[in-house]
Amino acid sequence: MMKSATYAVRSPYVVNIEDLRLLARRRLPRAVFDYLDGGAEGELTLSENVRVFREVTFRPRNAVATDAYNLKTRVLGEELSFPALLAPVGYSRLMHPGGEVAAARAAGDAGTVYILSTISGHKLENVKAATKGPAWYQLYLVGGREAAESAIDRAHQAGFTALVITVDTPVAGMRERDARNGMKELLGASLFAKLPYLPNFLAYPRWLTSFLLDGGVPKLENIVIPGHGPMELMDVVAALSRAVVTWEDLGWIREIWRGPIVVKGILTGDDAKRAADKGAAAIVVSNHGGRQLDGVPASLRALPEVVAAVGGQTEVLMDGGIRRGSDIVKAICLGARAVLCGRAYAYGLAAAGEAGVARALEILKGDVERTLRLLGCSAIAELDSSYVDTRLLQNCLR
């Protein structure tokens, strides 16, 4: 099966991330694909995340010969093969039965970090065991403090090396595609409520067969409610509104988690400084992939303000809109230590499981190396703002 999947995503069938996206769209029922592909409300921020990269152009150094190119970088003390981490993606097991386990294994093989979402269908212990690389755990307070403390302890025992606190989800964003496709009803218990939406699933027999053989809608194995067991998947949206993360929460989290804490969901210099002052080892400039508050700036626009605000006090990462290795290089030039990729690898997961994730990472890494060569730059560590056009930068980032 792995060999067949690898064949399906190799060149010339798949040469970029958009090719993986099209394969995912062909394989998944509309409701599942739109959950992965869509954003909040009018999807203005979703589209701007991608578009803004087009407004940043390169300034290469030509007639430069270099024997070797160093793509490696260090994030929180971990050496990565290239400056991209796999972002937390919820509901991954709905996209492919391998879900988080398959993605983590591919990340480890590629020499980078996998970040596991709280909203995951595989046990965190199994996910960590699957990767030979570092893994971080992304924490929501869904299920209450006791459930969160249990997950933190399990993550520590399993060998996760950093805790990612997402701070931009006081409620779930209004994802209109999900509402139209009946995601709430499809994940719920009422068969009657599901009936209007079932024909689309029946039109994808291969996906449906693998979904049913995997046991159907998975429980959230890492949100264990005392006295009740793992949370049902359908309970998440309501639970988010009762699980707002505040700056005060970082205090008790720090008491029970002694490793580095990463704060994800920062878009302003003020919040970045506050996170750094609270002891964040790293900050992720992120608008949640355009899935929360629509109309906020693209992550790349917010990046220079955040970098300037923290002044080297903490490491700065970025996610949102990464579709090519050249996007990664542009983010590094603007001050990011590395980027998080979400949809870019999730399309691969949906298209072909572990082989699809591996192909996504291969494409992005190859893009980064080629971009460095064409820029006349021998190492990721040498990138800075001199490699991009600052006049366009002033126009698109002001």
Image (cartoon, rainbow, N blue to C red):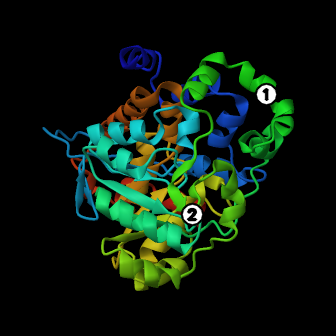
Residue 93 coordinates in the image, percent (x, y): 53, 38
Q: Secondary structure at mark 2?
A: loop
213 left or right of 197?
left
- Residue located 64% across and 54% down the image: 290
Label number found at residue 198: 1
Res 361 visible = yes
Q: Quadrant of the N terminus?
A: top left
- Position of 79 relative to 278 (above/below): above
Displayed quadrant of residue 265? bottom right
Residue 305 coordinates in the image, percent (x, y): 50, 73
Closest to the observer, 382 or 193: 193
Q: Give the residue at the far left of this rendering.
A: 67
Closest to the observer, 239 or 232: 232
**Label pair 1/2, CB-CB below 8 angstroms:** no
Label number found at residue 227: 2
- Position of 309 relative to 127 (above/below): below
